[in-house]
Amino acid sequence: MLKPPKEGQIQMNFAYVLASDENDIYYEQMLVSLISLKHWNPDAYVCLVIDDDTADSFSNPLRKRHEVFVDEVKIIHFAFSKGKHYRSRFLKTTLRENLKGDYLYVDTDTIFCEKIDGEIFSSDIMGVDDHHQLPSNFSKWPEITKDIRKAGFSEKNIDHYVNGGVLWMKDSEKAHHFFSLWHSLWIESLEKGVIADQPSLNETNKRLSKMIDILPGEYNCQISANLKYLHKAKIIHCFASTVSNVEKQNFAYIFLNLNFYLDIKRRPITSDDERLIFDAKSAFDGREFILLGSNDVIIYRTNLYGFIRCLFLSNRGRWLFEFMDKLVKAVVFLLWRNKK
């Protein structure tokens, strides 16, 4: 049940969706997000929406640590067996129907850096540009359009491609209609082999006359894509796929490292962990450097791979990459000829 706001304050409600078991790190990422949320927003009302399989996985005491941070848990029962990715996106696209009140939805792979002021959330649906880029100048846009077309949609007339990691949703007729259409279009895209929810999210926005209002980038600072908004970030978004799919990769940003979450999966949160979480904007390994590409920020250890990759992606360094490529080919050719 929603708490009444204090006098003179705007009540901020936050919603998470979780589909997880003991074999992943989604729970641990959410725990970090919850710790940061309640540190900066102690009066926040937090609702966690989960499926019944995830609820069954909370038998381990280390998977009950969310209880002190969450005000309400809603368990949605599935009558059929589906994987975590399906359940997560099903819960997300039906979220508006399962909650009462205005909410800021946040992905579990987010970290709060400041108090969230509710005054900015004035529209029915609000979100941030994906990768902080407009389609017209986004280097990865051709890759994104592949999923859009595969889902049966078109990339035409998309001025803003919105990231689904942080979404403001008002408890209004328009917002309910938006989520209903989003869920239907997601089901359609799923039948065509696209489980991601962003193509259907943005198709919904297009069909409803671009109903999503764009929030400033600091409300969803997508750090593995761009550092432009890090200095004033209110919410940092780490991208779970970046963390989960790069096993034991040493990134400069602490919360992009899989090992951090594997550690807290096995042990209690320490005061050192909390210091990192509470000051997430500064959670960089001091031994690392940040290597910049032309449009995107690549955060690697300063090894040869990271150096070469940044040269490849950077317009300014492309000439050096091409020179190195030709040099290596020439050396290999000479060595191979001498060997024969």
Image (spheres, rainbow, N blue to C red):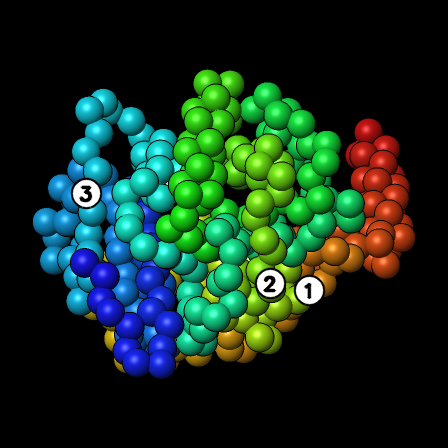
Name the residue: 62% across, 39% down: 209
Residue 276: image quadrant is bottom left
User: How far apart are the two marked residues, 2 and 3, measured between alpha carbons?
Assistant: 32 Å
Query: Do labels 3 and 1 touch, CB within 8 Å?
Result: no
* Residue 137 visible somewhere in the drawing: yes
- Image quarter in which the N terminus is found: bottom left
Crowd class of label 1 (few under 14; some 14 to 19; many from 20; radius 10 Å): some
Which amino acid type is shown beneath numbered disc 2?
Gly
Which amino acid type is shown beneath numbered disc 1?
Leu
Crowd class of label 3 (few under 14; some 14 to 19; many from 20; radius 10 Å): some
Which amino acid type is shown beneath numbered disc 3?
Ile
Crowd class of label 2 (few under 14; some 14 to 19; many from 20; radius 10 Å): many
Lateral position of residue 139 relative to residue 1, left or right: right
Name the residue: 28% across, 43% down: 98
Residue located beneath label 1 in the image: 291
Lateral position of residue 146 relative to residue 127, left or right: right
- Image quarter in which the C terminus is found: top right
Mark with earlier residue (2, 3): 3
Mark with earlier residue (3, 1): 3
Depth check: 206 or 26 in front?
206
User: How far apart are the two marked residues, 1 and 2, measured between alpha carbons?
Assistant: 21 Å
Mark with earlier residue (1, 2): 2
* Residue 273 visible somewhere in the drawing: no
Residue located beneath label 2 in the image: 217
* SS at mark 2 in the image: helix
Residue located beneath label 3 in the image: 75
User: Where does residue 169 sit, x and y in percent of width and height?
Assistant: 43, 52
Residue 304: image quadrant is bottom right
Name the residue: 24% across, 24% down: 81
Name the residue: 51% across, 18% down: 192
